[in-house]
Image (cartoon, rainbow, N blue to C red):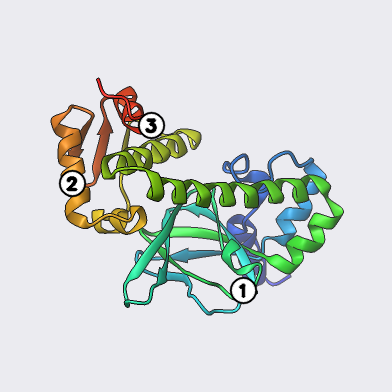
């Protein structure tokens, strides 16, 4: 093999996405797979894609081909509603999946946009389906992932339908806290990658309402807020808000 080709091949092997070597594998699809099954999944992951803040991973109306595992970074999904505004439908972080919206119709129904410089692993869905039929553990876990998304969507609907503004924000922050904790980060101190306007869009609240709720949480010593940096001072206090307790 020519030296240049060998060097290129070595570089490719170094940067090639490998589920078996990924420290996110317990959060992503490969959980519970045997080593030989992981090797098959390694071969299935076709490419790693890097995006700058503001880049679209895919757009509504685009043909669905792959699902994407977030390797690093943060994303939002949104849809264009009738009055011309963008409605945020979700936020996805490291170790979570994007693209499931396109499975039923084979067309993406929302936009996926990077909120910071990010990297994803692309998994062609047709190949994943074929491998899932061979590896029942993978099929079972993928069904669990889809179920989790359905439960999350149901949770958001309940949030918007039954909770007051401050309760919605408390639930949102506690959910983020739990997700950061699952990834080995501090559950009490983290940076918000999304703007308050985007939080409001997701929670069905006006920007002014979100800002007032943050201010009130600070006054009650529930949070310390500096720009987008959040420090949760009283987790139990936030939980009490969600259970309609007052103390």
To which residue does mark 2 refer? 227
Question: How many angstroms separate mark 2 from mark 1 (CA)?
Answer: 37 Å
First in residue order: circle 2 vs circle 1: 1
First in residue order: circle 3 vs circle 1: 1
Disc 1 is placed on an element classified as loop
Residue 234: quadrant of the picture = top left
x then y, percent, for residue 81: 38, 73
The residue shown at (70%, 51%) is: 142
* Front position in the image: 136 or 1: 136
The residue shown at (62%, 74%) is: 64
Question: How many angstroms separate mark 3 from mark 2 (CA)?
Answer: 18 Å
**Lateral position of residue 70 relative to residue 42, left or right:** left
To which residue does mark 1 refer? 64
The residue shown at (76%, 42%) is: 33
Residue sitting at the far front: 162
* Front position in the image: 38 or 74: 74
Quick one: quadrant of the C terminus?
A: top left
First in residue order: circle 3 vs circle 2: 3
């Amino acid at each position: 093999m020519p030296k240049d080709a060998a060097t290129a091949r070595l570089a490719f092997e170094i940067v090639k996405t490998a589920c078996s070597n990924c420290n996110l594998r317990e959060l992503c699809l490969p959980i519970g797979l045997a080593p030989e099954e992981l090797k098959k999944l390694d071969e299935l992951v076709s490419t790693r894609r890097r995006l700058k803040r503001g880049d679209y991973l895919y757009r509504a109306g685009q043909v669905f081909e792959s699902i994407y595992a977030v390797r690093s970074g943060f994303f939002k999904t949104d849809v264009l509603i009738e009055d011309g505004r963008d409605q945020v439908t979700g936020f996805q972080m490291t170790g979570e999946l994007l693209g499931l919206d396109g499975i039923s119709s084979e067309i993406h129904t929302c936009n996926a946009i990077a909120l910071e410089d990010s990297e994803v692993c692309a998994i062609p869905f047709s190949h994943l389906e074929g491998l899932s039929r061979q590896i029942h553990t993978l099929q079972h876990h993928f069904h669990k992932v889809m179920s989790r998304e359905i439960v999350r969507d149901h949770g958001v609907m309940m949030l918007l339908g039954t909770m007051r503004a401050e309760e919605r924000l408390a639930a949102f922050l506690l959910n983020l806290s739990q997700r950061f904790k699952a990834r080995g980060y501090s559950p009490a101190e983290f940076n918000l990658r999304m703007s308050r306007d985007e939080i409001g869009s997701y929670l069905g609240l006006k920007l002014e309402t979100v800002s007032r709720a943050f201010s009130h949480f600070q006054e009650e010593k529930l949070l310390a807020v500096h720009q987008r940096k959040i420090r949760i001072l009283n987790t139990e206090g936030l939980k009490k808000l969600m259970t309609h307790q007052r103390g």
